[in-house]
Image: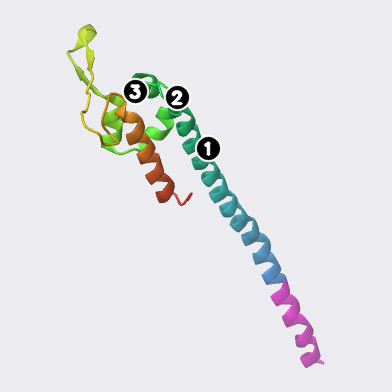
């Protein structure tokens, strides 16, 4: 009788424990997956917004750096790209003025609005790093 009772109790206890563990870990795993999906979606939207703003051929670095999307992408950008967007300044106090650098040549990062190509290259690199492409 004890042998038959142990045949019933042991599987019941194992089933109870595995069910309890499953009900604890399943939502945690689901939350982790959803968190990764949301992060990916947010990154995709950020890249899309930056490209949309930069699609305006006539946008200047001052307009881009004052745009909300620049504040969002800035932490992920290299120092060179930030410098291309933010430029250099001279003077101090109320006499501060922006130094406009015009790079001569025929490269992608030459010309008056060379910041656009640098930022576009930068976000392409971010796409690779983030596994979006």
Measure how far apart labels 1 and 3 are at the Cα level.
21 Å
Q: Residue at x 49, y 30 (%)?
A: 52
Label 1 with label 2: CB-CB less than 8 Å: no
Residue 16 image point, x, y percent: 72, 71
Q: Which residue is mark 3?
A: 61
Residue located 59% across and 58% down the image: 29
> Which label sits on residue 128?
none
Reading the image, the residue beneath label 1 is: 45
Pick the quarter of the image with the N terminus: bottom right
Earlier residue among tags 1 and 2: 1
Q: Is residue 34 above or below residue 70?
A: below
Q: Locate residue 95 relative to residue 25 in the image: left or right.
A: left
Q: Quadrant of residue 81?
A: top left
In the rendered image, which residue does mark 2 sit on?
Answer: 56
Q: Secondary structure at mark 3?
A: helix
Range of residues picked out in magenta: 1-15
Q: In the structure shown, which secondary structural element does the residue marked by tag 2 occupy?
A: loop
- Looking at the image, which residue sits at the far top? 94
Please provide percent x and percent y for residue 126. 40, 44
């Amino acid at each position: 009788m004890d042998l038959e009772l142990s045949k019933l109790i042991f599987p019941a206890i194992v089933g109870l424990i595995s069910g309890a563990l499953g009900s604890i870990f399943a939502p945690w795993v689901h939350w982790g997956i959803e968190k990764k999906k949301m992060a990916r979606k947010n990154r995709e939207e950020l890249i899309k917004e930056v490209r949309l703003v930069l699609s305006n051929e006539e946008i200047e670095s001052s307009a881009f750096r004052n745009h909300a999307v620049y504040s969002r992408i800035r932490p992920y950008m290299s120092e060179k790209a930030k410098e291309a967007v933010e430029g250099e300044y001279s003077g101090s106090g109320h006499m501060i003025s922006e130094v406009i650098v015009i790079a001569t040549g025929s490269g992608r990062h030459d010309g008056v609005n060379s910041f656009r190509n640098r930022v576009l290259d930068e976000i392409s690199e971010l796409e690779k790093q983030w596994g979006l492409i």
